[in-house]
Each structure stands twice: as C-alpha cells, then as structure tokens.
Amino acid sequence: MLTRRMFTGCALCAAIGLVAEDASAQAPSGIKRTITSRIDGPTQGYETLQVIVDVEPNFLIDWHTHPGTEAGYVLEGIGEFRVKDTEMQQIKPGSSWVTSPETPHTLKNGPQASKLFVTFTVQKGKPLATPVPAPT
C-alpha cells in the first residue's frame, strides 16, 4: 500500500519529467515541466536532460533519488532544499545544488511560485527518479 507521501513523490517524479520513458506525460496541478534538451551521453548508457520546472507556492517535492547526477539552479522563488544527512538549505534566485546518484533529497517550495533549471545526467532506461521514504 502506497503511503500518501510515497504517492505524492511518485506523482511528482512523473510530473517533472522524471519518468524517462514518457517525457510528454501531462503534469498534475502544482508543477509544470518543460524539457528543453535531451541528448545521449556524456558516456555510453547515459542521457542528459535539461528541464525547466515551474513549482506552485508551498508545493512539496517529496524525498526521491535519481540514477545519476542532478544539478539545479533557482531562477525565481525561494524554498527549502534538503539532502539526506545534511542540514536544510534555504534556496533563492542564484542558488544552485548538485546531488550525487542515488542520494535522497527533497524540496519544499516557498510562498511564491518558483522556476528552476535542472540538468539530469542519468542511466538510460531507468526511471529518472524513485520516491524513497523520508530518512530517519
């Protein structure tokens, strides 16, 4: 049985293009994604996606991992970003982050809409993201 938290994470992953097999799937309310580039590489068996993510106010991107590296940059808005075993960091325009492969992380958007630019370099054929339980 999926918990509400896991369901939210699954829905979110699909919404921001995190299911590599169907990047054209319609996003649920709360988030809009635009894939601006999708190429093979940088090495065999990997692909790189560049995605603009529009996040509604107070929306939670629940705990999840990626089968590769995620590099993000905040264009607009503020939020609270947290990676497992680290302190929460406040993000705002100009903030950036990089998460290592298979590292749980989450983002709670602030009181205004946010726009993020995210680059994923991930293993081809794997789901781009996998929801995970909140770390203890």
Image (cartoon, rainbow, N blue to C red):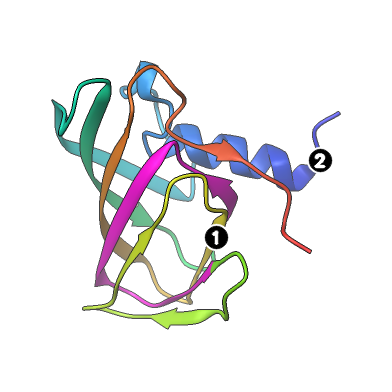
Q: Which quarter of the picture shows residue 9?
A: top right
Above or below, 135 against 64 in this view is below
Res 99 seen here:
yes
Magenta span contains residue 77: yes
Q: Which residue is mark 2?
A: 3
Is 135 drawn above or below residue 92 in the view shown? above
Looking at the image, tell me whether mark 1 or mark 2 is earlier in sequence order: 2
Pointer 2 local density, CA inside 10 Å: few below 14, some 14–19, many at least 20: few
Question: Label 1: which residue?
Answer: 106
Q: Is residue 27 above or below residue 54?
A: above
Cα separation between marks 1 and 2:
17 Å
Which of 71 and 80 lies nearest the eye of the viewer?
Answer: 71
Residue 28 visible to the viewer: no
Instruction: Give residue 26's position: percent from left, percent from top.
Output: 39, 27
Q: Residue at x 47, y 32 (%)?
A: 14
Residue shown at the point (80%, 33%) measured from the top left: 2
Which is closer to the viewer, label 1 or label 2? 1
Check the image and name the residue furthest to the right.
Answer: 1
Q: Return the x and y of residue 36 as percentages of the image width and height.
A: 14, 38
Secondary structure predominantly adopted by residues drawn in magenta: strand
* Residue 100 left/right relative to 36: right
Name the residue rendered at 22%, 36% in the picture.
49
Quadrant of image for the N terminus: top right
The one nearer the camera, 5 or 69, is 69
Specify whether residue 114 is painted magenta.
Answer: no
Q: How far across and down, in percent of the image, does residue 54 sit?
A: 32, 54
Label 1: few (<14), some (14–19) or many (≥20) C-alpha neighbours in 10 Å? many
* Disc 2 element: loop
